[in-house]
Amino acid sequence: MPTAPRVRQGMTLGLVFGAVLFAGAASGAWGEPDGSSRAPSSSDAGPPAGDLTGADLTPQQARQLVGASGDRWAAYLSPQQYADLTGGRYAGVGLSVDREAGGPTLVAEVLPDSPAARAGIEAGQRLVTVDGTPAEQLPVTEVVSRLRGGPAGSPVAVGLRGGDGDGPVRQLTLTRAELSTREVEVDHPAPGVARIAVHAFTEGVGDQVRAAAAGARGVVLDLRGNSGGLVEEAVATASVFLDGGPVASYQVHGEHRELTAAAGGNTAAPLVVLVDGGTMSAAELLAGALQDRSRAVLVGSRTFGKDTVQQPSRLADGSVLELTVGRYQTPAGRSPDGTGFQPDVPAAGEDPDGLALRVLDGLTGSAPAAPAASRAPAPAGAPAASGALAAP
């Protein structure tokens, strides 16, 4: 377990359900199980189960345990699923789905050059069936699980129709492929401004954000739709913009633990963070920390509202079982549970991207240039953060 007030380096805890890394749906939590050092995650489930590291369970027994736990964020992952999803790779068809309350299941995004893209599937279409089962009868997380429920080369049948719901259902059989998630995307909407979109916190994201922010006179960090991931990488990202200090704290079996940013981050360049209802888990933890530390202005809409922490246990066959064990708080002691975090500047019908740039422009007008030392990337091999954890 992590030590207070800092978390031991090398410890990883995931609080994001891997299947949602390219699904646009919140469904669970993950971490790096090592059998000894773990940081917890949390949920609204009942009392946590004991440590199951090394337990000799069949996949069926593990799934039954998850189902019987009453823990909405619990998850069972095969060894390959866990390695792929924390490493930013997965077997799937390359489409992201979304569903408003009571609404249809829609294709939210199609990954370029993916099986879905090659089949002519487009964002906005309705996903009607998955392997013959009506999508509306399944939770979004189950829809995602079925789309990604087999190895590369395996088939999955889908039925789609136009976004208006009219017309015949188009039946397709897609072949899953090994895909890479694009977790960090960067553009420069104005001279000296870096807009960095982080879609999920998988391995290496903190270093990618550091490289993208280097030399920028202002940064827009876009966490919209970020369902979380490895807390370790969220803390590493916080360390890009903070000079040490607290990022979050959490309780595990009554013990108080803290996550701390590494020293030496760029605290001079103005920072705006874009958030919305899809900002959850580790992304929510990061946004709340930067807001509490008065390091960033949050723009957009209220975040998802999940404060739970899951503990990963590596089973005897190498698979991973995640069960809720605690809850996290921001440096100011706030919890997003059920309410989320409110932005400092609500978009309120405005274009959030344009609003973020206007807010950043107002900040950069009075901000000093970032010192050269703070603009330099971290030396190779230097730790990005004092510890690792993933947030739901």
Image (cartoon, rainbow, N blue to C red):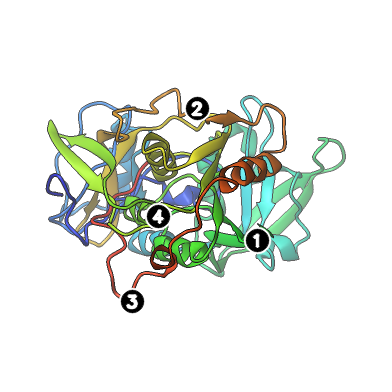
In the rendered view, tell whether residue 23 sits above or below residue 185: above
Q: Report which residue position mark 3 lands on.
A: 380
Kindly report the distance in space between the C-alpha atoms of the residues bearing marks 3 and 2. Answer: 37 Å
Discs 1/4, front: 1
Mark 4 residue crowding within 10 angstroms, few (<14) / some (14–19) / many (20+): many
Which is more N-terminal, label 3 or label 4?
4
Q: What residue is shown at x 86% (from left), y 36% (from top)?
A: 166
Which is more N-terminal, label 1 or label 2?
1
Helix, strand or loop at disc 1?
strand
Q: In the depicted view, which residue is nearer to us: 342 or 21?
A: 342
Q: Report which residue position mark 1 lands on.
A: 188
Q: Report which residue position mark 2 lands on.
A: 342
Kindly report the distance in space between the C-alpha atoms of the residues bearing marks 1 and 3. Answer: 25 Å
In the rendered view, tell whether residue 52 sits above or below residue 80: above
State whether residue 219 appears in this view.
yes
**Where does the image place residue 216, in percent across and percent down from the top left?**
54, 61
